Amino acid sequence: MQFVIDLPDDLGQKLLQQADVQQLVQKAIEKILLEQKPQLLTDIAKDLPEITCFKGREPLEIHKALRDEWN
């Protein structure tokens, strides 16, 4: 697979000075991807801002109240 990336000129020149550019780039990308920890949806949700009107309420209760509002 081929992948194209734009680099700043100075960084591109440094990259071209490396002995085996393809291997260097492959190893760098592999290292980056393997070091990333997959985030669970619950972990992502913890970083969301808290909405005060929902604080202390159970999600199921909120859902039922919104659903029953239309009955």
Image: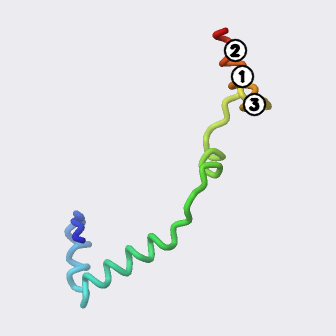
Position of the C terminus, as image quadrant, is top right
How packed mark 3 is, by other alpha carbons closer than 10 Å (few <14, some 14-19, many 20 or more), is few
Vertical order, 66 against 3 (above or below): above
Residue 68, disc: 2
Nearer the N terminus, badge 3 or badge 1? 3
Please state which amino acid type lies under the numbered disc 2.
Asp
- Percent x, y of residue 50: 67, 35
* CA separation in Å, label 3 and label 1: 16 Å
What residue sits 25% from the left and 88% below the top?
Answer: 20
Vertical order, 23 against 54 (above or below): below
What residue sits 64% from the left and 52% below the top?
Answer: 43
Please state which amino acid type lies under the numbered disc 1.
Lys
How packed mark 2 is, by other alpha carbons closer than 10 Å (few <14, some 14-19, many 20 or more), is few
What residue sits 67% from the left and 12% below the top?
Answer: 69
* CA separation in Å, label 2 and label 3: 20 Å
Please tell me whether mark 1 sits on a helix, a strand or a loop: helix
Q: Which residue is mark 3?
A: 55
26 with respect to 32 (left or right):
left
**Can you tell which of label 2 and label 3 is closer to the viewer?**
2
